[in-house]
Image (spheres, rainbow, N blue to C red):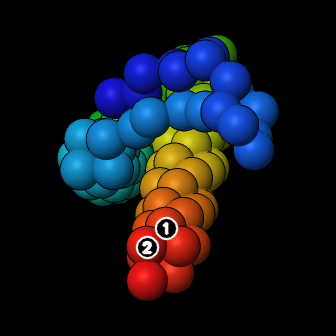
Amino acid sequence: MTDPDLSPAADAGPRVAADPGAAAVVATRLQAAAAELTAIQTELAALLIDVDMAVGTGKSAGAFRAGFSPAAAASTDRLHDVGNRLGQRRRALVAGIDDLLDRDAEASARIGRADA
């Protein structure tokens, strides 16, 4: 997706050549993964409700819940954290793509003016 070009340009520091199309594909895949993760979170919540209903009431049910609930809550929290991180990385990638495209357009405009 990126190919660092460390040869110095006359008027700039190190350059990075990137494939915005490939980066856009990765951003789309990250978005799809986040959507699938949301579906998993929804399914887990429904499953936990079903488990709670199936356990019933009584002393043994209370003991089960006391042991099971913290693990279920931790799993839910971890899934939520992963979803947040996926979203952050996707936003950073999209911002990077946008920045590269903007800089490319600016450079093309400068080159175009120099040729005129």
Instruction: Give the Cα separation between the discs numbered 1 and 2.
Output: 6 Å
State which quadrant residue 22 falls in.
top left
In the rendered structure, the answer to whether residue 52 lies left or right of residue 85 reads left
Q: Are marks 1 and 2 in contact (CB under 8 Å)?
A: yes
The mark closer to the camera, 1 or 2, is: 2
Q: In the rendered structure, which amino acid carries the disc numbered 1? A: Ile
Badge 2 is on which residue? 115
Please tell me whether residue 96 is drawn above or below residue 17 in the rendered image.
Answer: below
Residue 13's spot in the image, x, y percent? Answer: 76, 33
Could you tell me which residue is drawn at 68 percent across and 24 percent down? 8
Please give the name of the residue rendered at 34% of the width and 29% of the height, measured from the top-left corner.
Answer: 1
Within 10 Å of disc 2 (Cα), the crowding (few <14, some 14-19, many 20+) is: few
Question: Which quadrant holds the C terminus?
Answer: bottom left
Residue for point 42% across, 27% down: 2
- Tell me where residue 47 appears, x and y as whole percent: 31, 42
Q: Nearer the viewer, residue 45 or 2?
A: 2
Q: Residue 110: which quarter of the image?
A: bottom right
**Which residue, given by chain and number where applicable, does mark 1 sit on?**
111
Q: Nearer the viewer, residue 83 or 12?
A: 12
Residue visible at 51% across and 81% down in the picture: 113
Q: Alpha-carbon neighbours of circle 1 within 10 Å: few (<14), some, or many (≥20)?
A: few
Count of numbered badges drawn on the protein: 2
Residue 85 in picture, x, y percent from top left: 61, 40
Could you tell me the amino acid type at mark 2?
Answer: Asp
In the rendered structure, the answer to whether residue 107 lies left or right of residue 21 reads right
Q: Nearer the viewer, residue 19 or 107?
A: 107
